Image: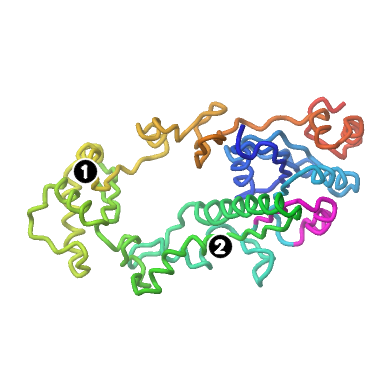
Amino acid sequence: MGALSGIRVVELAGIGPGPFVGMMLADAGAEIIRVDRLGGGGMPHLAVGRGRLGGIEVDLKNPEGTETVLRLIDAADVLIEGFRPGVTERLGLGPDTCLARNPKLVYARMTGWGQDGPLAPRAGHDINYISISGVLHSFARAGERPVPPLNLVGDYGGGAMFCAFGILAGIVEAQRTGQGQVVDAAMTDGSAALSAFIHGMRGIGGWNDQVGTNLLDTGAPFYDVYTASDGGHVAVGCIEPQFYAQFLTGLGIADEDLPGQMDKAGWPVLRARFAEVIASRTRDEWTAVFQDTDACVTPVLDWNEAAAHPHNVARGTYATPDGTVQPEAAPRLSRTPSKAAGAPGTLTPALLAGWGLDPAEVAKLAAEGVLGGLADAG
C-alpha cells in the first residue's frame, strides 16, 4: 500500500503538468477519478495518465452533470484542475463552491502564469513560462541563443512537482485543522524557485550574468559535454579538485603544463585540450576508463540506452507496468513504497457507489447522455 492509500482525488481532465501531478499521486497509492467533458474521449495513457481508477465523461452544461461532479468532490480529499483562471468558476466547480460543500478539500490549481497578474488570462506553454522567470536565459552557451530544456523545467519541475508539494502540504494541514485550502501552483513561480541557488550565487558575486561563462552553464571546461571519436558524447562534471585530478589522470594529461583549474583566463586552453583528447577515443572507451573512478565522467545516453544501463537496471529506475517502458515511481519510501501504476481502469456504477453515487442514478444519467465513458452503465 502506498503512502497516499486512502486519499481520494478528483482530476479535472487537462494537459501538461496536471496529469503528471495525478501520476505522482497515483504512484503513491492515491485513488483518482478523472473527469472529462462529454465526448472528450479521455486522455491517452502516455505514462502520465497511469494509475487512475478510471475516467468519467460529464456534460458540464447540464446541471445534473455538474452536480454529479460536485458529489464526487464531496467524497474527495483533493481536486486537481489546470484550466485558465475563472473557467472552473464558470462551470460551477470553483473553489468557493467546492470548499463550501467539502471544507477539508485541497483545491489544486495548476497553471502557467498563476491565478492573478497581467498574464494570468493569456495562453502560454512551458517555453513562455520559463522565459519570463529568467530560467530559459541561462540554458545557452556563450554567444548562442537559449535552448529549451524540453518541457522539464516549467511543466514538470516548476509546475507539477511544486503543485504536488502544495497538495501534500495542504493534506497535512487539513488533517490537523479540518480546513482545506486552494493551492495556486504557477510554472513561473515554480521555475523561479528552482533557480534559488543561482540567485544566491549572484548575491555573493559567484555568478556572472554573461551567459555561458559560469561554473554550471558550460562556462567551465570541467563541467561540460564533449564529443568522442564515434560522435557519442561524454558528460564531465569534476568540480572538486580531487575529482578534477582524477579526470586529468584518466585523460593522460595530469603531468602536462596546464592552466590552473579555476584560472578563468586559462579555461579556453583547458577546453581545447580536453576536447582534443576526448575526441581520440569512443564514448564507450571513455566510459570504461572512468567508470571506477570519482572523476565524474559519464556517457550521455539516449532513452533506450538509459533504460538498459546497469545502474538503472539494478535500481529498477525504469519499469514496464503495462508493457511500455517508462520511469518507475520516485522518490523511494522504505515502508510504503510508491510503484509505477499500470494503465488506467474503467469506472463502473458499482465503483462510483463507493464515492457516494447511487448506481441506479448513474445508469439513468448515462442513458440520458449526461455521463459517458463508463462500463456496465446500462
Query: Quadrant location of residue 310?
Result: top left
Q: Is residue 38 above or below residue 148?
A: above
Q: CA distance from mark 2 to mark 1?
A: 38 Å
Q: Is residue 103 above or below residue 188?
A: above
Amino acid, disc 1: Ser
**Left or right relative to 5: residue 317:** left
Q: Residue furthest front?
A: 176
Secondary structure under tag 1 reads loop
> Which amino acid, mark 2?
Tyr
Q: Nearer the viewer, residue 106 or 313?
A: 106
- Magenta residues? 86-110
Q: Position of residue 196 (x, y in %)?
A: 46, 64
Q: Which mark is residue 129?
A: 2
Classify the position of the C terminus by image quarter. Answer: top right
Examine the rendered structure and indicate whether residue 163 appears above or below residue 287. Answer: below
- Where is residue 348 shown, x and y percent of the image? 79, 29
Quadrant in the picture for the N terminus: top right
Residue 97 at x, y percent in the picture: 84, 56
Residue 107 located within the stretch drawn in magenta? yes
Left-right relation of 92 to 191:
right
Residue with the mark numbered 1: 229
